[in-house]
Image: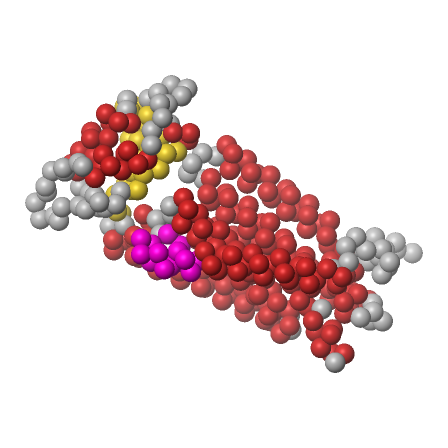
């Protein structure tokens, strides 16, 4: 005689979590967070300084970014971004033949690594103009580490091409997920899985819209990569839960759909939490120890993992129980 696994032998009275009794609170929490996220996206779009739902970075708009490493030992003297911006506005850059003089009226300055490095976001500059900016900023931010300077320039046409490529890759990925789920499940499951995916992506984008408004944080091509990763993670978690719901529907036909969903979620809850926890550990390590280059990429992934787990074990299954109520009506 083959022993059944604890998950398959769970009875309706052995629930770790009764989802059906909490679904209204689940819907309220998700609706509130999505509303705040959409508000951030709209406000960012209406901001004249941005003009997009998210503040686009150098990868998408083009321009010159200058990274400076300050030679100040274990601690750096206090440097205010406002002072650096005012200094850059006052600079007179050398004129280059056949080029339009750059407009330095709205420079973007960020202090990184506890003030030990400085990031300047400027319009497209020539090599000589970039060096002139470094020489002009050094009296305020210096002394600077010799060789610790990086100047990256992306033309407007290349930035526009990267933006189009990122949007196309996201569209193709989401379309592929939609087709796969539609073939694997019936219409109800496919609709809810795509709704959970949209829920997760909206919240992550909303968070970065608010960060763009409050901290002038820009999104780059790494952010597009994080959205693709979040989409795959979210759908994977949702598919696991939906597979377990289908098993419970076959094994426990005498129960209502709400009870079957409760049983399935209870059986997968531990697995989902363990998977999310182990995924978050390296992401938290990147956030705290990975440096300024990866911190926001890891932050987007970490938020996506948390939100994706929530939508997979709470939101999507709780919405599935609506069909149970409609079938009884």
Residue 237 on the magenta segment: no
Residue 282 x/y as whole percent: 57, 38
Residue 5 x/y as whole percent: 83, 53
In-image side of 325 versus 173 (left or right): right
In-image side of 252 versus 172 (left or right): right
Residue at the spot 50% in from the left edge and 32% down from the top edge? 289
The colour scheme of the drawn protein is secondary structure
Q: Is residue 109 visible?
A: yes
Asked if 318 appears above or below 69 in the picture, the reply is below
Residue 55 x/y as whole percent: 37, 52
Residue 18 x/y as whole percent: 77, 58
Q: Is residue 147 visible?
A: no
Q: Quadrant of the C terminus?
A: bottom right
In the picture as drawn, the residue positioned furthest to the right comes out as 1
Q: Quadrant of residue 164?
A: bottom left
Magenta stretch: give its range. 41-55
Towards the viewer: 241 or 17: 17
Q: Quadrant of the N terminus?
A: bottom right
Residue at the spot 51% in from the left edge and 57% down from the top edge? 36
Residue at the spot 50% in from the left edge and 47% down from the top edge? 300
In-image side of 154 versus 325 (left or right): left
Asked if 85 appears above or below 12 in the picture, the reply is above
Q: How many marks?
A: 0
What secondary structure do most residues of the magenta stretch adopt? loop
Residue at the spot 70% in from the left edge and 74% down from the top edge? 323
Residue 42 on the magenta segment: yes
């Amino acid at each position: 005689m083959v022993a059944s696994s604890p998950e398959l032998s769970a009875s309706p009275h052995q629930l770790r979590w009764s989802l059906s009794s909490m679904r209204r609170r689940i819907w309220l929490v998700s609706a509130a967070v999505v509303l705040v996220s959409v508000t951030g996206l709209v406000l960012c779009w209406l901001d004249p300084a941005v003009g997009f739902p998210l503040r686009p970075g150098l990868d998408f708009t083009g321009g010159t970014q200058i990274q400076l490493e300050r030679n100040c030992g274990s601690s750096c003297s206090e440097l205010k971004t406002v002072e650096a911006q005012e200094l850059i506005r006052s600079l007179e850059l050398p004129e280059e033949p056949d080029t339009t003089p750059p407009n330095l009226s709205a420079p973007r300055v960020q202090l990184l690594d506890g003030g030990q490095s400085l990031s300047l976001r400027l319009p497209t500059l020539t090599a000589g103009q970039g060096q002139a900016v470094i020489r002009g900023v050094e009296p305020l931010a210096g002394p600077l580490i010799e060789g610790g300077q990086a100047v990256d320039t992306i033309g407007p046409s290349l930035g526009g091409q990267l933006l189009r490529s990122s949007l196309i890759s996201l569209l193709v990925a989401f379309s592929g997920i939609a087709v796969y789920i539609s073939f694997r499940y019936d219409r109800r499951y496919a609709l809810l899985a795509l709704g959970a995916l949209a829920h997760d992506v909206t919240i992550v984008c909303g968070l970065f819209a608010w960060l763009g408004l409050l901290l002038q944080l820009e999104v780059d091509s790494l952010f597009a990569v994080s959205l693709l990763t979040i989409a795959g993670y979210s759908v994977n978690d949702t598919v696991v839960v939906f597979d377990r719901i289908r098993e419970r529907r076959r094994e426990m036909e005498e129960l209502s759909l709400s009870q079957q969903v409760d049983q399935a979620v209870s059986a997968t809850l531990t697995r989902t939490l363990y998977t999310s926890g182990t995924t978050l550990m390296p992401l938290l390590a990147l956030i705290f120890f990975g440096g300024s280059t990866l911190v926001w990429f890891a932050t987007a992934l970490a938020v996506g993992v948390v939100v994706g787990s929530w939508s997979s074990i709470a939101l999507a299954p709780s919405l599935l129980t609506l069909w149970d109520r409609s079938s009884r009506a």
